[in-house]
Amino acid sequence: MHYKLDLGIDHVLNHEAQDTSPRQWEVIERLVSEFATGEGAREDLGRTIFASATTSNRSSRSRARWPEAFAQKRRGFPATYTAAGLRFLPLEFKHSFRSVQIVLDAVDLVFQDAGRISRSR
């Protein structure tokens, strides 16, 4: 069964990884276990693991359910890839663009117009 899954999984995205439980990480690790062997069923393809997490601001850190599990995987995956002679590229974004003023203004404008449209019907 794992071989069949390996044929179809090339990329894994884990959004809000700080909220991923140790049990969920275990599932992810099993799904991607062939990614770093170099002998996987899809060795001609660059396979990726992408985990996004909010860890830098205090309010989200206090809400994170499993920050220790994420921290452990953040250290473990690069070590696994490096040991296999594969490139692991950790990226850290210092800024969130979801809350810059131009985005907030655009959202306000959209909802302001939506309110006018619904009242005019």
Image (cartoon, rainbow, N blue to C red):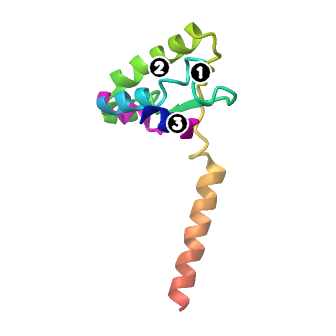
25, 112: nearer the viewer: 25
List the residue tagged with mark 1.
90
Is disc 2 in contact with disc 1, using a CB cutoff of under 8 Å? yes
Residue 86 visible: yes
- Tell which circle, 1 or 3, labels the residue nearer the N-terminal end: 3
Does the segment drawn in magenta span residue 116? no
* Span highlighted in magenta in the image: 7-22
Placement of 1 over or under 119, stated as above or below: above
Residue at (39, 35) in percent of width and height: 60
Mark 2 is on which residue type?
Answer: Arg
Residue 105 sits in which quadrant? bottom right
Residue at (65, 16) in percent of width and height: 87
- Tell which circle, 2 or 3, labels the residue nearer the N-terminal end: 3
Mark 1 is on which residue type?
Answer: Pro
Residue 45 sits in which quadrant? top right
In the rendered view, does 68 fall on the left or right side of 83? left
In the rendered view, does 6 fall on the left or right side of 2? right
What element does badge 3 sit on? Answer: strand
- In front: mark 2 or mark 3? 3
Q: Position of residue 2 (x, y in %)?
A: 44, 33
Residue at (42, 31) in percent of width and height: 28
List the residue tagged with mark 3.
12
Q: Position of residue 53 (x, y in %)?
A: 47, 33
Residue 40 sits in which quadrant? top right
What element does badge 1 sit on? Answer: loop
Q: Position of residue 50 (x, y in %)?
A: 55, 32
120, 31: nearer the viewer: 31
Is disc 1 in contact with disc 3, using a CB cutoff of under 8 Å? no
The dot on residue 74 is 2
